[in-house]
Amino acid sequence: MSFPADTHQTQSSVDETECGWWQYPVLAEGLDEAVYDSDELRDSWKPFVGALNSLGKDRLERRWRDAQALIRQNGVTYNVYGDPRGMERPWQLDPIPLLLSAVEWDLIERGLTQRARVFDLLLADLYGPQRLVNEGKLPPEVLFGNPGYLRACHGLRLPGDRYLHFYAADLGRCSDGSYKVLGDRAQAPSGAGYALQNRLVLARMWPDVFRECGVQRLARYFQSVREGLQALAPHNRDTPSIVLLTPGPYNETYFEQAFLARYLGYTLVEGADLTVRDNRVYLKQLGGLQQVDVIFRRLDDDYCDPLELREDSFLGVPGLLQAVSSGNVAVANSLGSGLVESAAFYPFLPEICRSLLGEELILNAAQTWWCGDPQSRQHVLQNLSNLVIKPAFSGKRFDAIFPEFLSSSQRSRLIERVQARPSDYVGQERISLSTVPVLTDGKLRPRRHSLRVYVAGRPGGYAVMPGGLTRTSNADTSPIVSMQQGGGSKDTWVLASGVVSPFSLLPPADQSVELSRAGSDLPSRIADNLFWMGRYVERAEGLFRLLRVVIERMTEQTGYGDVPELPILLRALAHAVHSESEPPPSEIKDPIEWFEASLVPLLFDPERDCSVANTLGAVQRIASMVRDRISLDLWRTLRKLHLSMRDTGEDRSFRTLQPDEKQGVEGASRPNLNDVLEQLNDGISTLAAFSGLVAENMTRGPGWTFLDMGRRVERTYNLAHLLKNTLCKKSVAESRLLEDVLSIADSSMTYRRRYLAGLVTAPVIDLLLVDESNPRSMAFQISALMLSLDSLPRENSGPGRSPEQRIALSLLTDLRLLEIDRLTHVDETGRRAKFEEFLTRIVADLPALSNALAGRFFNHLQVSRHLARSTGQPPQ
Amino acid sequence: MILRSRHKTTYCYSDPVSLCHNLLHLTTRNTHSQFCLSSQVQIDPEPAAQVERMDCFGNSTVFVTIQSPHKQLEFTAINLVELTPGPPIDLSQSPAWDLPRGQTGPPYDAATMESWQFLYDSPYVSRDAELANYAADCFPPGRPLLQAVMDLTSRIHSEFAYDPKATTVATPLKHVLDSRRGVCQDFAHLQIGCLRSLGIPARYVSGYLLTTPPPGQPRLVGIDASHAWISAYCPRFGWVDFDPTNNIIPSDRHVVLAWGRDYYDVSPIKGVILGGGKHSVSVSVDLVENDEFLQPI
C-alpha cells in the first residue's frame, strides 16, 4: 500500500534551534524532496533554507501577504468546471519553491527531450506508413480503435515535417528516487504560463534568495517557443503573423492563454475571429482580413475544424484542415497529435523507442497494463487493489480510479465495465509520490507532488523549460494531484551548475526595430468587446451617481417628507434599473417602499438585471475577454471595483441594520445608508481612476475609439433617460430636482460658476443638452462620437456618409438647432411636450446608431452552423 | 453494363449565406467490379476554392468554398460507371466465422492492415454485447462466415420496418434496435455494429441503387435516392457487400460512391455555413442505364 491511512503519525522534525523557524515534519513513509533520513536537509535545499531562516518568520509572512495580494490583484485565476464561484477561483501558489539540483535536472532534460523525439516520430508513423502496427510492435487496436486517431488528419502535409512542437509530461518521483512519467500532454499542454506567473511572483517575493540560490531563468525557453513558431511559417518567415487560438474565456486556463499571448506578443484569438478563404486562414480585423501564417493552438485536436473534425462544436475554424493541407498555414501542435497522449501506448513505448530512435527509453512511465491485451487484463483484474485504473485512450476521459478505496459493489461494477470494454482501460502501478514542504496556516506540512515539465520544438531540436509547474495534493493523505480538485502549485527552481545567464525576453534598447504606429490590427471581436466595456462602465457610473444622489437626499433629512422630489427621483431610478422580470415602473404605487425592498438586490444581486453587481460583473467578464488588450493597471482598477462590491455583498454585517438606525418605513431591513453612500463614493472614485487611465495611458487607436464610443453612447442614453423621467413634467419641487439632476450629471460646479442666480430650468437644460464645452452634455457626447466615427478605418469607403455617421450628424445638428425656450415651455397640462418628444427621439435613435455600428464593424462575427443533411432513402 | 447517375442537392436559404465550406463525397470510386468512366460535380454558384483530395479510405473527396453571398446553393454530381460483376460467390465455401484468424505476420499484408480500420468503434457505431447477442442466432459455431452474414442480412430485412419518420442521422443504434424501425443507413449501421461486436471487420458503403419501374410504365425522374449498405471482410474472399434494406448481395444494380467506417466518414455533403437564416434542402437522384434518356430536371 502506498499511502498509509495513519499519515498523521509523523517523524520527529528538524531540530528547531538549528534551523530557526524551519520546522518540517516529514511523512513516515515515502521520499521527501527537501529532507532525508527524517531530519537531514538535502544539499540543494541548504542555501534556500538558510536564506529562509535568516529572513525570519515575520518578514517572510509579510512578503507572502504582499505576494498573495499581487496574485489577487492581477487576477491570476484558474477556472474550475462546475464550481459555484465559476470563473473566480484564484490561483493557488505556495511560497516555498521546489528545488532541483543540476544533476537531477540533467536526467529530466535528457529524458523529456527523448520522449518528445519519440512521440514526434511515432506520430509521423501513425499518421503515415503505420510501420509499427505492420511490424507487430503496436497492437492494431491501439491505433485503429483509438478515438484520438483522427482519420481526417492522416497523411496531412506538415511544414518542417514535425508533428510535435509542444510537449509536456507530468513526472512523479518514487520512493527509490527515480522519476516516472504519470501522463503525457501532446496536444496543447497547459500550465507553462502559470509556471512563468509563479516565477514572476516568487522572484519578486524572494529577490535576494533567488539570486543567492543561482536559479536558472525561464526566459530562454520562451525565446525558443517564439523561434520555433516563427520557423513554422510557410510564407513570410521574417515577420509571420502568429496567433494564439483559445477556446475562450470559459476554458479552465484562459487566464494563462491571455497572459502567454501578451508575453509572447501574439494576438489572442477565438475560432470565430478566424475565417478560411481561398484555402488560407485570415484574422477578421476592423481594417479587413489579415492572413495568418501560424496558429499556436490551445484548442484540443477534434475541436479545431467543425467541418472535418468534431461536428458538435464551433470553437474551431471551419475549413482549417484544408488550409493546413494546402500548406498555407501551420498549426502547432499539428492536428491529431493528441493521439499519443493515450496511456495504451505505455507498455509498447520502450520497444517503439528502440525501433524509432535506436535508444533505450530514459524516462519510463509508471508500469502500465493495457486491458485490450488478454494477459494484461487478467493481471489488472487480479491486482486491482495495487493499481490505479485510467482511460486507455486520450479521447475518452474519466478520473483515475483507485480500486482500493472502492466498496465491493463499486468494485464489481468496475470489473464489469472493464470486462465489457477492456481496451478502454489501463491499469497502472501506483506510485508513492514524494512529498514537498507546503506552507499551510503558518506551518510547513508535507504534500505529495507532481511536476509538469515543458518542451518546445525549435529549429533543429527541442528545448526544455528549466523549471516547470509543480502541483501539490490538497491534503496530507491525498494521493491525487490536480488543480481541478483543489490542489496547489509551486514554482520550480532548477539550480544552475555554473553561472546563470542573464537572458531576458526584453529586447536590448539599442536593437533597431522597424517603426510602427499600430493602426487597424484590432480583431473585430475585441472592438465589439471594448465598445461594450465602455457602455457597461458608463452604465455603472450612471447608476452609482443616481443612487448616490437618491441616498444623499434620504440621509440629509430627518424624514422623507422633507424631500418632496424623492418620489420623482425614485421613479427615475426605477426606470433606469427596470428589468423585464419586474412590474413596469409606472405601476409602482409607493416608490419609497419599492426602494426599501429593492436596495439590497439592486446593489448586490448579480442575478438581477441592471443591478450594480450585475453591471460590474458584466464589466469584469468583458474585461477578462480583452485582457490581453488592456493595461494591467486598467485591469486592476476594474477588478478592485468588482471585488470590493462582491466582498461587501458577502459581508453579512453590512446588510443587517440596528433597529435605531432605521429611518422612514418601520420594520424595513436594509443596510445602513451611510455605509452604502461610502461604498458608492468609493466606486465613483475608482471609476474616475479608470477614466483617467483610459484618457492618459491608452493609445488612441481603434481600441480606444471603440471604448470611448461605448461610453459616449451610454452617457447620452443615461442623460436622455434621466431628463425624460425628471423634467418633462413641471413639478412643485422643480428647483430641488434641477439641483439633483445637475449633481447626477456632474455639472453643478459649472452651473454655479456660470449662473450666480438660483436654479432655472432653461439654463440647466442648455448646459446639459446643447453646451458643447461641457464634457457631460449630450452635444459633447455626440460630437465626440462623430469624431470617432470619422477616424475609423472603413473598407470600400464611398464618398457619402455611412448610416451611423448620418444618424450621429442628424442628432448633433438637431441638438445645435434646439430652441431652449420652446423646449422648456410648459403647456396647460403642466408638461413640456416638445422636450419629451425630443428626448423620446434620442432614446429611439441611439439603438439605431449602435446597430449601424455593429452592422458595419462586427457583422462578420456571425455564428457558423452545419448544413442540414439528407438521410438515405430506400428505393421505392 | 454502363450506368449514369445524377445526384442533385439544392439548399435554399431565407437570408444570404456569406461563406460556405463543403466536403463532398459525390464521386464514384473504382472497385473490383466497378470502373468509373467519368465523373463531374457542378456547383452553382461558382466556388472560390475547389480542391480534390483522397481521404484515408481511398475515396475521392472534394473540398469547396463559396465566398460570394448566395441564397441558393446547388450541387449536381454526374457519374458514369461500368459495372462488371464477377460470378456469384459460393457463401458456403467461406471459412468458419469463429475460426482463429490465420493471420500471417508480422509484417501483415495490406488487406489485413486495411481490415483493421473497420474492426473497432466509429463515430456512429459502437460495439456492445447487446448487438452481439442480437446476431448470435445467425452465428452458430463453425458456420461459414459469409453464410452467417447473409443470414443476418435477411434477419434485419425481415425484422425491421422501413420508416423514414422513425429516425434521423443522429438516432442512436440502441434506439433503432429497440424500435425495429429505420432507413437504409440505420440498417447498415446496425449490421456493422453486430459484425464488429463479433470481431468481424465491416464497413459502410454509400452509393446508389438502380430501380426498375413497374412493367409498362416509364421511369419517373428524380425518384431514386442515395443508398447505403455494408461490406464484410472475409479472409481469402476479401470484402463482400450485403444490402440489409433489400436482403440481397449487391452485384449489377448497386453503384458505389465511397466507403468508410460509418456514415460519418462518407456522408455525401457536409457543410458549414455563415449566415443563411432558415434553410431547406431538397435532393433528387437518378440512376439509369447509359442509353436511357436522362431528362433535364
Image (cartoon, coloured by chain):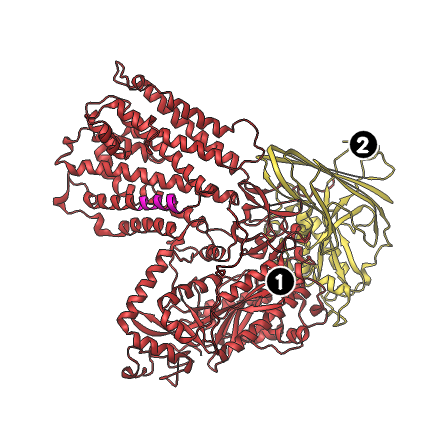
Figure chain in yellow? B
- Disc assigned to residue B144: none
Please provide percent x and percent y for residue A482: 44, 65
The residue that label 1 is drawn on is A146
Figure chain in red? A
**Residue A452 is at least partly visible in this image:** yes
> Residue furthest toward the front?
A510
Asked which secondary structure carries label 2, the reply is loop
Left or right, A21 with respect to A131, comes to left
Q: As shown in the figure, which amino acid type bears the numbered disc 1?
A: Asn
Residue stretch in magenta: A686-697
Q: In 3D space, how far apart are the residues under numbered discs 1 and 2 (Cα atoms)? A: 47 Å
Q: Which chain's residue wears label 1?
A: A
Please provide percent x and percent y for residue B137: 68, 59
The residue that label 2 is drawn on is B295
Please provide percent x and percent y for residue A769: 33, 27
Classify mark 1: residues with Cα within 10 Å, few (<14), some (14-19) or many (20+).
many
- Quadrant of residue A684 within the rendered picture: top left
Asked which secondary structure carries label 1, the reply is loop
Classify mark 2: residues with Cα within 10 Å, few (<14), some (14-19) or many (20+).
few
Assign the magenta stretch its main secondary structure: helix
**Residue A589 is at least partly visible in this image:** no
Magenta span contains residue A662: no
- Placement of A732 over or under A327, stated as above or below: above
Q: As shown in the figure, which amino acid type bears the numbered disc 2?
A: Gln
- Quadrant (top left/top right/bottom left/bottom right) for the C terminus of chain A: top right
- Placement of A77 over or under B44, stated as above or below: below
Left or right, B293 with respect to A205, comes to right
